[in-house]
Each structure stands twice: as C-alpha cells, then as structure tokens.
Amino acid sequence: MISQLTRYISTQLATALLIIALSLTAIVWLTQALRFIDFIVNRGVSAFTFVKMTGLMIPSLLFVVLPLAVFISVLFVYHRLSQDSELVVLRAAGQSRRQLARPVWLVAGIAMLFSYFVSFYLMPVTYHKFKEMQSFLRDNYASLLLQEEVY
C-alpha cells in the first residue's frame, strides 16, 4: 500500500518529470528539426509533412532525454522539499531515509519501464517510418521540383 507521503512526493516528482522531459525534448527536437528545413525550402515539402517527418524523431530524443529529466526532477523536488524544511519535519516525524527515497524509486522505475517501451517498440517503428518517408521524398525529388508554378 502506498502511503500519503509517497503519493505526495511521487506526484511532485512526476509533475516535474513531465515538465522537464517535455521541455528538454522540445528543445532538442527544435535543434534537430532545423537540419530538415531543407525539405521545406528547397524541395517544396508541405509543413505538415515536415512536422510529421521530424516528429518521428521524438522517441529517440525522448530515450536520451528521459534519464536526465529524472535526475533533474529528483534534484529539483528534493531541493525544494529541503528548502521548505519538509524533509526536516518528515525526518523528525520518524521517516527513514528509505521511506523518503521510496517515491524516487517508484517514479524512476516507471520512467525505466517507459524507456524500455520506447527503446524496444517505438524507436524501431518510428525509425522505419522515418527512413521510408525520407527515401520517398528523395525518390520523388524530381517530381517535387517540376511542380507547376513553383520556382
């Protein structure tokens, strides 16, 4: 059974983890998407196709960013708990270090399982779709350049 303390800290950790992971993934995605701007500028690919193609990179970026996001969220939440003297109160109330670390193990375990899912399922599927789309766009390069009224 999960105690209220574990639920409280786990909620704080999960919220911080989601915000940090989404922010870091968006930043890295934006920098990586700039490499594919050539498809829009020179080849006349639609913005939807561009977003779809670069969106297929998100699982591989998330796989790299997620461990760092877990680390940062744990540091952030426990530093905030320490600054608000909540850790001191919890230790004085009889909570052991193991009980205070239980939410970290819980959230890190869920993040690890999600990373396994991304690594073993999402990354291969999206990589295959990305390569298919990339080869389709390269093979149809001539047809994209010969469109009517496109200079």
Image (cartoon, rainbow, N blue to C red):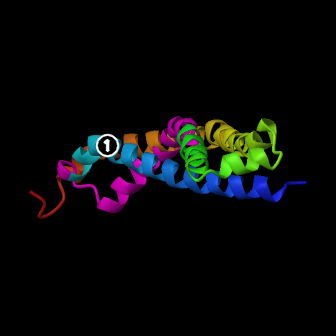
In the rendered image, is residue 127 in sight?
yes
Residue drawn where x is 59% and y is 57% of the image: 15
Kindly give the residue lying farthest to the left in the view shown.
Answer: 151
Residue 139 visible somewhere in the drawing: no
Residue furthest bottom as drawn: 149
Tell me residue 125's x, y (percent).
Answer: 58, 43
| Residue positioned most to the right | 1
Determine the residue positioned at 70% across, 42% down.
104
Left or right: 65 in relation to 45: right
- Magenta region: which residues? 41-70
Residue 19 in picture, x, y percent from top left:
51, 55
Q: Position of residue 18 (x, y in %)?
A: 56, 54
Secondary structure, magenta segment, majority class: helix
Quadrant of the image for the C terminus? bottom left
Say which residue label 1 marks.
Answer: 31
Q: Residue at x 83, y 45 (%)?
A: 94
**Residue at coordinates 27% horizontally, 55% vertically from top-left?**
45
What is the crowding at mark 1: few (fewer than 14 residues within 10 Å), some, or many (at least 20)? few
**Helix or strand or loop: what does disc 1 sit on?**
helix
